Amino acid sequence: MENPKNKKWLDFVLKQNNIQKNKNWINVLLLPARNTYNRIIALCKDENRNFLTFLLSPITTIYKQEQIHALIAFFAYFLLMASYYMIRPTRSSLFLKEWGWEAMPIFYLIIAVFTLITTFGYNFFVGICSRAKLIRIVFSTTILSFIAFWLLYKLGYYPREVTIFWYIWVCIYILFLTALFWSLNHDLHTAEQSRRLYPLLLLGAQAGVYFGSNMTQILLKKWEIGNYNLIILSSLLLLGVWILLEILSFRQASRQTASIDTSQNTQSFKGLLKLLKNPYPLSIAAIVVIGTFAFTICDLQYKRLLSYEIQAPCEYTLKDFSDIEGILKKIQSPQNNIMSSLHKNLSQNFRLKLENHQPHLPMDVLFQEALVKEINALLHSLDLYKEENLKDIKISREIQKKLKETQEKPRWNRLILDSILAGEIHKKRTLIEKDANEQTAFLADNDKIMALCNIIMLFIIAPRLLRWLGPGWTVLFYPLATIAATFAFFYGVKIQTAAYFAIALSVLHYTLYLVGKEAFYVPTDKDTKYKIKAIIDTFGYRLGDALGGGVSTLYLIFLSMIGSNFVAGLGFFIFLAGFVWIPATLYSDKEYKRLTKQNNKE
């Protein structure tokens, strides 16, 4: 028989054990909070750290005395990328509207030539101007050029040739502004500071990409301000960048009035012979050239799908018309076959409303909406694209090209009516303009997704992959993804699927590919790091663009000669390039490991 005293003692012991277990669980749950509290207390006692240091600690370590200029640089890069990605989609959409995707390969060649010429011009100013003066020259020139483009569009004087200069200028100006931003930061920070502060600046850049892309989408889709007004907004953001860089320059500890050191000037070709003789930097150059070449070809096929498949709704809205009464008069008193066809096919219901309408009185909103609804119904029911209908009207070359590309009856009806009713429709609300706005918003949405993915890749995935796999295998993700995208184009994907590939390629290019490529230079000597790298960065990317544009142009000419439209066949050239691209990447990885091991022994 069990002793009651022993039972009470056993219950007491079990109760105490449970209490102790509960306390242990509570301690485990409270441990992160206690650690955070202890870190904050330690920061308060540390003269070099504060609460902002604690908040940014998951990204990097920024000491109290560095925080002001680090935050100024952060917001400067944020605004610079926001400004660029606000207008970057307009570059493609406006060009496609005026010239079509077929002309893009030629302009890849032109951009390559212009970039080289302007690079030499920029380097000339770098050699003779102080940093502060160079900032003022570059930013004032860029902002004034933006205002000039905006005024041309705003005043209605924008021949097709203006779109060419806009396309080229948007491709070029960002190179110099970015180079100027980083050269100023290189002067401001030591090597140790750059390792800690640059991750914050990269985060600012991606946040700027997201903000600029998101604003573009909102301004075009909800506020409907049009592509051209984005240019003036972008210039205002650039003005903010200019002010912040002036503040950074003013805060520079050792302000130099002399010209900038030009030891790394890309006008020097002394490193070219060493590049050709040394297989390691030559393999890096091959990676750069082929990577740019493949990106150019994939981008052309993506923009082709964009121009065909991303289109605005063809129906009119009341906001599209500047003179709704003028439209009614043209329908009532037709002067051509098109308007006669509209007049004959008016619905019985609308004819009754028309009989009750008093011409000497202004049209009320309900009647205006009924007229717009009637026109939209006729867009879907009539077929206006007939030779006898088009004899007595003038149609612009731009609309004629769109009519040939269009397969849908409502869209070609809308394009024809846009020509006839040009005086009664807002110039910025024609179907062609709406298509361009829709394409800009689509590209901006892709850029927004890309920015979020870039943040994840840069701060979570890329550092771990570099540590686990090394730069070579990290870089290899990009050519493999490019080849996968090429197979997708062969298969015949729609624009939404192509957009996913475009986002994936952009993310891999701007994160794993660039980070891994830059890591290849780490174990090399100074000549390779500066002189040879400058040559590769200046000429390698432009040569890739030129090769991509040249091959695409010749291939499109060949297709027109044989009467084919198999544009996806451009992917064969990517497959051929892969036989050099992938071995060059693997060789670079092997040499990187060898040089790293050799440097560690020394």
Image: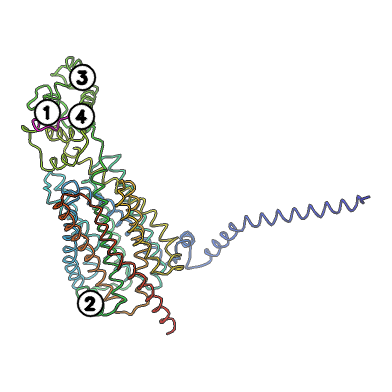
Q: Quadrant of residue 536?
A: bottom left
Q: Amino acid at mark 1?
A: Ile
Sequence order check, earlier mark of 2 and 4? 2
Q: Amino acid at mark 3?
A: Ser
Q: Amino acid at mark 4?
A: Leu
Sequence order check, earlier mark of 4 and 1? 1
Residue that badge 1 annotates: 338
Sequence order check, earlier mark of 3 and 1? 1
User: Which numbered circle lies on residue 272?
Assistant: 2
Q: Residue 44: percent from the left, percent from the top?
A: 52, 63
Which segment did they paint magenta? 381-389
Neighbourhood count class around disc 1 (C-alpha, 10 Å): few under 14, some 14–19, many 20 upward = many
Q: What is the C-alpha distance between the residues marked 4 and 1?
A: 12 Å
Q: Residue 592: percent from the left, percent from the top?
A: 38, 75
The answer to whether residue 226 is magenta is no
> In the rendered image of this protein, does residue 562 appear above or below residue 409?
below
**Residue 573 visible in the displayed image:** yes
Q: What is the C-alpha distance between the residues marked 3 and 1?
A: 16 Å
The single residue placed furthest to the right in the displayed view is 1
Q: What is the C-alpha distance between the residues marked 2 and 3?
A: 75 Å
Q: What is the C-alpha distance between the residues marked 1 and 2?
A: 65 Å
Residue that badge 4 annotates: 379
Q: Residue 311: percent from the left, percent from the top?
A: 25, 41
The answer to whether residue 385 is magenta is yes
Residue that badge 3 annotates: 347
